[in-house]
Image: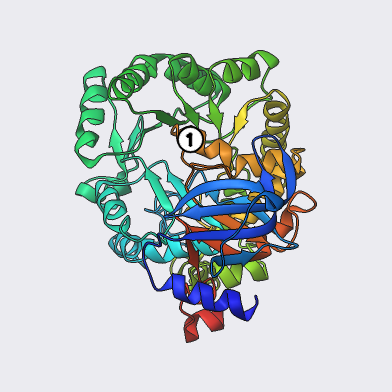
Amino acid sequence: MNKKLQILLATLFCISRFSAQIYIQNVTVADVVHKKMIPSQTVVMNGGIITAVKPSKQVKIPQNSHIINGEGKYLIPGMTDAHVHFFQSGGLYTRPDALDLRKHVPYEKEISWSHAHMEDLLQRYLKMGITSVIDPGATYNLLKLRDSLKVNERLPSVYMSGPLITTYEPEVFKNLGKNEPFRLLLSIDDAKKLVQEQLPYKPDFIKIWYIVTGDAEKKKEQTKKLEPTIKAVIDEAHRNNLKVAIHATERFTAETAVLNGVDFLVHNIEDEIVSDDFVKLLKSKKVIVTPTLTVMDNYYDTYGQKKVYNTYELENSNPESIGSMYDLKHLTQTSDSAMLNKRKARFSEPKIKAYISKTDSIRKVNLKKLADGGVMLAAGTDAGNIGTQHASSFPAELKAMKESGMNEWQILQSATIIPAKILNKENEYGSIEAGKTADFVLLNANPVDNLEHLTKIDLVIKNGLPVDREKIIKVTPESLAQQ
């Protein structure tokens, strides 16, 4: 970064809103709508809005203007992680329903941590070039926190549902008041009430947790039995102009939800290879799917005590969250050692390994079928779950999408323009076009040549304002030790 640009950024970083025009000159622009790189462009922004995108030869820049030199660089829209959870830290103690270690860290401490660190996590997303996040499953207190953080224009935009309206509520999450992430759905009357209950908090959408248990036949019976209440939630949300996201990982729960009008599947199908008819159904209904390919393996690797983070993840994750994952080493010497060692042994069994391998394969095959069939796909990590760190888990998710057979342009679209369509925001952000919000990532290399180039970030701009990536997260002795 040259000295002139450093001075410009230092000036702009000290203000909250800049009304003069800024020019990003001679840059290659990623047109994610038409899937092409357009060289030698000048992007003009004013007051946080893109005012022009033109060939540099056609733009006459006045003297003493604020210019960012884009020569040899690539400008992509700010990215979106379309599936995160701020009620979860990504650490070892964040899901006591899955791994109950409350005798070591009370769940109330986890709740307090999530509120105290939401801004820190958002800064880490921004450092990664992620300028928007979608949280399908929060709490009433987190919705209020979302509102209070909106005043900071250098934080990612947060789109959040209220508590998950669920067909099953784990005991550990009950009786938490406005910190409760789940609301139990028992009847059609409940469906209407639970949607109405969220409206004063202004959720960006409604989320359903469509959980069925037992063998395949039992699950199908439950799916059919629960269908009227699921439909009632969807209808009530739509009556209030709110889209509906759903956790439905079985083909028949997902298909039932889609036929009843759901808008967004927050996971891929993992119980069977989907049919061509199912793919056509999703496309015809314009349903968006987030594959979340890596989150379950992070659970399994944690249970098997073999979770290992790479240097990038260690450098960019919250040090407390990622540090807690290494607590397993000393917890195996506590009163929980029998439970932890039993779980470790279980996830080393050939039968369990075969099951995990089969499920991973189904997800990947289905993702390729959906992509080839023209279904809209939005990249999302399910960050916050045990082992899936906020912000730093995004590159691994994109890599898994690539390994499933998606090409670089499809993946870039899944991280930019398609997530904007989830909540009908595609006219506001997601691509580099006049009239849209000036959310950009300036890269030092072409991401279409190699997805790893998405981490080679020169500059992030949010709402037309630069982000000082070196100063956005304070380096502490603890974070240095963790890195």
Of residues 219 and 34, the one nearer the viewer is: 34
Q: Is residue 347 visible?
A: no
Quadrant occupied by the N terminus = bottom right
* In the image: residue 382, left or right of residue 376: left
Of residues 237 and 194, the one nearer the viewer is: 237
Q: Is residue 129 visible?
A: yes
Label 1 secondary element = loop
Relative to 105, residue 424 above or below: above
The part of the image, by quadrant, that contains residue 311 is bottom right
**Colour basis:** rainbow
* In the image: residue 130, left or right of residue 409: left
Which residue lies at the image location 28% right of the left edge and 36% below the top edge?
183
View extreme (bottom): residue: 477
* In the image: residue 107, left or right of residue 130: left
Residue 292, position as x, y percentages in the image: 58, 42
Residue 422, position as x, y percentages in the image: 48, 33
Relative to 73, residue 319 above or below: below
Which residue lies at the image location 51% right of the left edge and 72% below the top edge?
9
Q: Which residue is mark 1?
A: 427
Of residues 168 and 20, the one nearer the viewer is: 20
Quadrant occupied by the C terminus = bottom right
Relative to 375, residue 483 above or below: below
Residue 88, position as x, y percentages in the image: 41, 55
Residue 325, position as x, y percentages in the image: 52, 66
